[in-house]
């Protein structure tokens, strides 16, 4: 839903419709789904809260605070350790050590 909000900062009616659609999608996955009025009330609450608090300015500040080059480098290093990237680098390290 955050991506939907960032795609143009829609009017509340549009945003509520997107929240309601998403909430209904989640609701059908429950063993005992909530009634449609309950889902609608929850979606409206979420839509109101997010529409009030997630502004273009607030989002830009969040990105600036959490996506600096230093932070992204740390995240990239963490991701590398968890992926085949780390295994590949380790294998190359071992091969280079064997060649010396």
Image (cartoon, rainbow, N blue to C red):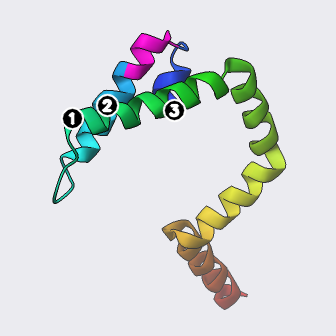
- Is 98 left or right of 57, judged from the image as shown? left
Answer whether residue 78 is magenta in the image.
no
Dot 3: within a 10 Å radius of its alpha carbon, few (fewer than 14), some, or many (20 or more) residues? few
The N terminus, quarter of image: top left
- Is 31 left or right of 70, judged from the image as shown? left
Tag 1 secondary structure: helix
Q: Which label sits in the foreground, 1 or 3?
A: 1
The image shows residue 32 at horizontal and vertical percentages of 16, 56
Tag 3 secondary structure: helix
Q: Quadrant of residue 30?
A: bottom left
Dot 1: within a 10 Å radius of its alpha carbon, few (fewer than 14), some, or many (20 or more) residues? few
Please, what is the dominant secondary structure of the magenta stretch?
Answer: helix
Query: Which residue lies at the image location 74% right of the left edge and 42% below the top edge?
Result: 67
Query: Between marks 3 and 2, how big is the CA–CA gap?
Result: 19 Å
Q: Quadrant of residue 38?
A: top left
Query: Between marks 2 and 1, how big is the CA–CA gap?
Result: 6 Å
Q: Which residues are magenta?
A: 10-16
CB atoms at circles 2 and 1 under 8 Å apart? yes
The image shows residue 19 at horizontal and vertical percentages of 38, 29
Q: Which label sits in the foreground, 3 or 2?
A: 2
- Is 4 left or right of 24, judged from the image as shown? right
Query: Which residue lies at the image location 49% right of the left edge and 9% below the top edge?
Result: 11
Look at the picture and state if 65 lies above or below 71: above
User: Label 2 belongs to which residue?
Assistant: 40
Looking at the rendered structure, which numbered label has been put on residue 36?
1
Looking at the rendered structure, which numbered label has been put on residue 2?
3
């Amino acid at each position: 839903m955050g991506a939907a909000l960032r795609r143009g900062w829609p009017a509340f009616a549009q945003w509520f419709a997107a929240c309601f659609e998403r909430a209904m999608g989640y609701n059908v996955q429950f063993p005992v789904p909530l009634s449609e009025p309950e889902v609608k009330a929850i979606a409206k609450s979420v839509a109101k809260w997010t529409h009030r608090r997630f502004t273009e300015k607030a989002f830009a500040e969040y990105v600036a605070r959490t996506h600096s080059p230093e932070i992204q480098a740390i995240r990239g290093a963490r991701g590398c350790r968890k992926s085949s990237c780390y295994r590949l680098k380790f294998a190359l390290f071992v091969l280079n050590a064997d060649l010396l």
